[in-house]
Image: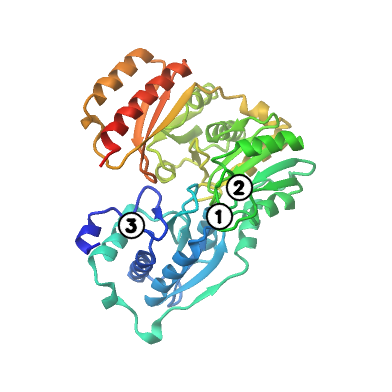
């Protein structure tokens, strides 16, 4: 692919760079150039400490992580940047440890909840937050439009790479410190699903050190089984184990542990909307909910909005993607936000979605109130919701699809103001997501399929 052809393609999506491993853009060549570009951008910034730049690199358990990790490290080294490798560590752990160690940036090599054959690159700044669009654009410009080989450091200024052994311990202590010191998890039985991913070592340690009896599944990664019918995208496995072990609660993480789905003692799924409701109501009761407001996305159930309103809490919605939630929270001083998928951001503790911190928050509410998770979760009633994915090979403005506007109007007329339609392209997969809510699940399911079929018939063929 020529530079001209490549430059017309977008490198960064809604959550960093992502794609099939060993295919553009997740190739060693692009990873090397991204590392070089990141190093060059960091060198152009004011010196934070000393003379050397430092970047922390962590990853999940995908086989291709080794390949991308080494390429990124080599690119950074060639720009005179020192690299510290943590090995497998949750995405929020990299954000925290990079900030804690005063690194100039943190890099996570992960495709989050995707299957093992995908991989991705997420970049955090020195403040622990994901880098902004302007920095992403500059990295992409350097990759596609500059001859980076002309910017390389002299031989005596090349950076070094070394592995660090205490990153796991740092994250474990950090996560435990978000749990109230006057509480413990003694006698609590927890089923924990690590999705064969980045948290397979740290998550069990966190819960066990707080006193819980932990039954762990999805903690035997082999490079190919990450998210494979385990984890937050497949919480039914946790549901079964909760019932089998008569556990008090289930905690199901995704591959990089930045999202969590919980399961109550009755084996029922407690998704991100319910977690937000539980946390928000408790924080408000303790006067710890900033501006009595929660930030969520357009995908969150109307039931969350209704529940929060009953409790005197405002819901602010953003575009889909945890970075949009974080941006809104930082811009307006809110401290709790998240997504139905389980990305929960507690800005009092974390700079990004953190599955373990969110789970610990719910567990602390259970302990401090004495209520079971089922009782806490029942504070919110879901409005029937259907989500259908339409596979696409190209994209356009949805309103340009023949018959689309007419179909949406017909559906809205049938819902009569008692539901909603929300359609968007995924930022990480080649699909359009069709979300409908309304009182009649069979009816909205039919409408969702009709809209998805229209989109797929128009955009699903080359």
Towards the viewer: 98 or 70? 70
CA gap, disc 2 to disc 1? Answer: 9 Å
Q: Residue furthest right?
A: 187
CA gap, disc 1 to disc 3? Answer: 22 Å
Mark before the other along the chain sequence, 2 or 1: 1
Task: Measuring from the top left, give residue 71's x and y in whole percent.
Answer: 42, 69
Task: Measuring from the top left, give residue 43's x and y in whole percent.
Answer: 35, 71
Circle 3: element type: helix
Image position of 279 with respect to 256: above or below: above
Circle 2: element type: helix
CA gap, disc 2 to disc 3? Answer: 28 Å
Q: Is residue 53 left or right of residue 61?
A: left
Q: Which residue is mark 3?
A: 136
Circle 1: element type: loop
- Image quadrant for the C terminus? top left
Q: Quadrant of residue 251?
A: top right
């Amino acid at each position: 692919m020529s530079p001209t052809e490549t430059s017309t393609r977008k490198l960064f999506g809604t959550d960093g760079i992502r794609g099939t491993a060993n295919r553009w853009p997740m190739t060693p060549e692009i990873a090397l150039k991204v590392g070089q570009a990141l190093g060059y951008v960091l060198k152009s910034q004011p010196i934070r400490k000393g003379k050397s730049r430092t970047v922390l690199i962590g990853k999940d358990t995908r086989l291709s992580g080794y390949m991308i990790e080494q390429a990124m490290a080599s690119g950074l080294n060639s720009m005179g940047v020192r690299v510290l490798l943590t090995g497998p560590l949750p995405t929020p752990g990299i954000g925290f440890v990079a900030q804690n160690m005063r690194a100039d940036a943190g890099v996570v090599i992960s495709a989050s909840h995707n299957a093992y054959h995908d991989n991705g690159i997420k970049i955090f700044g020195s403040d622990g937050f994901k880098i902004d669009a302007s920095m992403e654009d500059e990295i992409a410009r350097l990759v596609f439009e500059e001859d980076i080989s002309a910017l390389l450091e002299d031989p005596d200024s090349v950076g070094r790479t070394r592995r660090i052994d205490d990153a796991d311990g740092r994250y474990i202590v950090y996560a435990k410190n978000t749990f109230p010191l006057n509480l413990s998890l003694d006698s609590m039985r927890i089923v924990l699903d690590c999705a064969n991913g980045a948290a397979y070592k740290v998550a069990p340690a966190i819960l066990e050190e707080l006193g819980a009896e932990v039954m762990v599944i999805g903690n035997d990664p082999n490079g190919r089984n990450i998210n494979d019918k385990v984890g937050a995208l497949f919480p039914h496995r946790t549901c079964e184990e909760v019932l089998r072990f008569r556990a008090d609660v289930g905690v199901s993480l995704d591959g990089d542990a930045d999202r969590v789905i919980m399961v109550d003692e009755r084996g029922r799924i407690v998704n991100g909307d319910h977690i937000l409701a539980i946390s928000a109501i408790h924080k408000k009761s303790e006067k710890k909910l900033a501006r009595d407001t929660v930030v969520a996305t357009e995908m969150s159930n109307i039931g969350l909005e209704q529940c929060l309103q009953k409790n005197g809490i405002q819901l602010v919605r953003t575009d889909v993607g945890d970075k949009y939630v974080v941006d809104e929270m930082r811009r307006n001083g809110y401290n709790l936000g998240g997504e139905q998928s389980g990305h929960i951001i507690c800005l009092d503790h974390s700079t990004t979605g953190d599955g373990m911190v969110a789970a610990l928050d719910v567990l602390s509410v259970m302990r401090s109130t004495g209520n079971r998770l089922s009782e806490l979760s029942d504070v919110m009633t879901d409005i029937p919701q259907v989500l259908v994915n339409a596979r696409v090979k190209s994209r356009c403005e949805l309103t340009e699809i023949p018959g689309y506007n007419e179909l949406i109007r017909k559906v809205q007329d049938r819902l009569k103001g008692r539901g909603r339609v929300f359609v968007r392209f995924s930022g990480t997969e080649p699909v359009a997501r069709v979300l409908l809510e309304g009182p009649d699940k069979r009816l909205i399911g039919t409408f969702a399929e009709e809209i998805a079929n229209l989109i797929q018939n128009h955009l699903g063929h080359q």
